[in-house]
Amino acid sequence: MAWFTDSGYWLGRLLFQRGLAALYLVGFLVAANQFRALIGERGILPVPRFTARVPFGQAPSVFQLHYSDRFFAGCAWGGAALAAAMIAGAGDAVPLWASMVLWAVLWVLYLSIVNVGQTWYAFGWESLLLETGFLAVFLGNDEVAPPVLVLWLLRWLLFRVEFGAGLIKMRGDSCWRDLTCLYYHHETQPMPGPLSWFFHRLPRPLHRVETAANHVAQLGLPVLLATPQPVATWAAVGIAVTQLWLVASGNFAWLNWLTILLAVSVMQLPGAPVRELPGAPVWFTVVVCAVTAGVVVLSWWPARNLVSKGQRMNASFNSLHLVNTYGAFGSVTRVRQEIVVEGTSDAVLTAGTEWREYEFKGKPTSLRRLPRQFAPYHLRLDWLMWFAALSPAYGSRWFPGFAAKLLEGDRDVLKLLAHNPFPDVPPAQLRARLYHYSFTDFEELRSGAGWWKRTLIGDYLRPVRRGDLRP
């Protein structure tokens, strides 16, 4: 069946699969390095407590069957090792069925982590990685040319990612419609990068051009993905370029890189060597057709969401995170608020009490530190600190437990921070204060003021002692 496969996409598939394996590797490394503090047996939101109240059907996971920190670590490091092997080409070195099994194992392991990760894993790029990883199971290896149906499913996914994000903006904050959102976004985004200060200081007319170009990339180019080649390739290139702009201007974990990989799966690269691969065996054809039919059925919910006036962002309609809806920044904050956590060794507070600040790895605390580039690595605690600063409701489930861990001097939690001002003995008391942060201007930067300036808003958490808070 010549219609079922297309050898012209072999190079795009190769780049897509290797890149996807690399992002799986990052995801598993993030899980291995952070889980003990966040969701471990003694973590802020322990998995056993979660699985005791949430049934398997609502959150399918191998950790519903058994959980221990050692077992979780084994799954995370095992997933990382398998992802590294897939980067090296293990999927093409084995028979087709075995390659599908390897991709499926990666998907099951990461699904198991996401489904018990609770608020720490409630990000759109988790569902995006899972949906993309599921489709990769059926993309084949060197034993078969890329299946056309799966290539179209990847285009449908890329369309939802981009078009959904474009629609949520146009339906949301008025600053997207008057082209002023980027007056604020580079400064107020969850985790600025090393170039964000410079992006923020671009002339305002260029910010308006940025915003207009974003609308073209998210509302215009996705429509062209359904057109014949080479138009579809050029549309995908345009999307990829826009995503690279976002990579340069901020830290959004693997969202941008995964979107770029989806765009690569659309491309027929000019000058690529011609390589004819065998057609699909009958059993593989049957499986791919069945999966495609299933995705078409599940597409009803996200398609309806796209045309709905009450469009939802980053929502999964099933516990397997298949065929989701995506979108980001339907509203843009105009003012950046940051929580600064401080401790003191004084058992009794006086006017002379010295408060020392905890430093986070990614989110702004120190005024003189240039923001660092972490993406595609994901600092989950830092991201949720940004949400908690928007409203205490966002931190109500986990922030008290985080503060309690700092008062205990919990080593796993402290590993998530850049600087612990109490290396020997935990603080006697802890507090959190809310500040308004903003970038300095050129004059202030030249005078040595640093990259940020801040103004105190008030208390976020009043001084507490050990035992006052419970996870």
Image: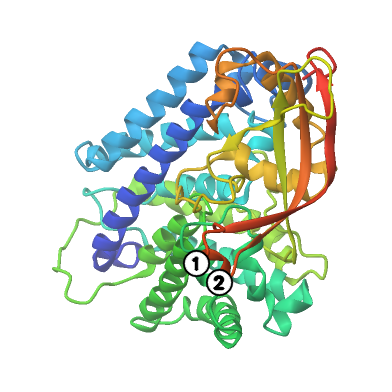
**Rendered position, 35 above or below 27:** above
Q: Position of residue 314 (x, y in %)?
A: 67, 54
- Observer-nearest residue: 412 or 283? 412
Q: Which residue is disc 1 drawn over?
A: 446
Q: Residue drawn 37% across and 34% down?
A: 101
Q: Residue drawn 57% across and 63% down?
A: 161
Which image quadrant is residue 358 in?
Answer: top right
- Are the two marked residues, 2 and 1, in contact with CB atoms closer than 8 angstroms? yes
SS for callout 2? helix
Q: Do we see residue 332 in this rendering?
A: yes
Pointer 1 local density, CA inside 10 Å: few below 14, some 14–19, many at least 20: few
Q: Residue drawn 61% across and 15% down?
A: 65
Quarter of the image containing the N terminus?
A: bottom left
Q: Which residue is disc 2 drawn over?
A: 443
SS for callout 1? helix
Q: Position of residue 449 (x, y in %)?
A: 57, 58
Q: Position of residue 348 (x, y in %)?
A: 84, 17
Report the Cα–Cα distance between label 2 and label 1.
5 Å
Which image quadrant is residue 302 in?
Answer: bottom right
Q: Position of residue 188 (x, y in %)?
A: 66, 61
Identify which amino acid the numbered label 1 is placed on: Arg
